[in-house]
Amino acid sequence: MQCANLLFKKKFNFSLILSIVVLFSGFSFAQMNSLKQLKKNTKDTNVLIKSIKSSDPWTANHLITTDELAKELKSSKSKKPVILQVGFKFLYNTGHIPGAVYAGPGSKKEGLKSIKNEVKSLKKNQNIVIYCGCCPWGHCPNIRPAYKELKSLGFTNVKALYIPDDFGKNWADAGYPVSK
């Protein structure tokens, strides 16, 4: 008990504490990896929560990180979402997420009309991920109007891809696949 109190009084990192727990409790490495993943997921969720403004049309549950989407696209077990790039055409042409469809800029009337046209044949419960990546998340002119449009059309499983800085830095430079 004294040892445990000492550990928590000192500022040991999570990995060291986790290793000690594994050593003394009989946790398996699979359990340890699950705990590490939980820590990462908690960190990701906290980042998402901090990114949300009171005027945003979504909650953290309606956002997906680049890491989460990349894993989902790699997985052979999950059904792939429809991915819509709702930014500017030149960005899509420069490089986009494999399988993404250019749907039009969410900040323009013709873009919203194009988005509406792109989803007209989809079921209302279809998994849809939208992204732009033109600029820092808080300043993106396209993602919020596109999200609102899809929700107003009755789509229930829409997620916005959280890109903190821009598509190049947070997707392409991070090593995720890009199509041209």
Image: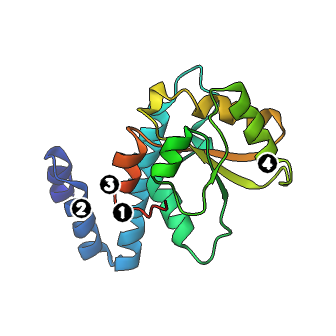
Task: Give the mark nearest the N terminus, 1 or 3.
Answer: 1
Give yes or no for contact between labels 4 and 2 (Cβ–Cβ under 8 Å).
no
Q: Is residue 173 above or below residue 51?
A: below
Task: Give the mark nearest the N terminus, 4 or 1.
Answer: 1
Left or right: 87 with respect to 169? right
**Marks 4 and 1, how far apart at CA:** 38 Å
Q: Look at the numbered disc 3 and give the secondary structure of its residue.
A: loop
Task: Give the mark nearest the N terminus, 3 or 4.
Answer: 4
Q: Nearer the viewer, mark 4 or mark 2?
A: 4
Badge 1 amino acid: Lys
Badge 3 amino acid: Asp
Badge 4 amino acid: Val
Give yes or no for contact between labels 1 and 2 (Cβ–Cβ under 8 Å).
yes
Give yes or no for contact between labels 2 and 3 (Cβ–Cβ under 8 Å).
no
**Pointer 1 residue:** 36
Residue at the spot 61% in from the left edge and 35% down from the top edge: 59
**Marks 1 and 3, how far apart at CA:** 24 Å
**Pointer 2 residue:** 15
**Pointer 3 residue:** 173
Residue at the spot 65% in from the left edge and 66% down from the top edge: 80
Q: Is residue 55 above or below residue 123?
A: above
**Dot 1 crowding, Cα within 10 Å, few <14, some 14–19, many 20+:** some
Determine which of the numbered discs, if any, sits on residue 119 in the image: 4
Task: Give the mark nearest the N terminus, 1 or 2.
Answer: 2
**Marks 2 and 3, how far apart at CA:** 27 Å
Residue at the spot 73% in from the left edge and 41% down from the top edge: 115
Q: Nearer the viewer, mark 1 or mark 3?
A: 3
Give yes or no for contact between labels 1 and 3 (Cβ–Cβ under 8 Å).
no
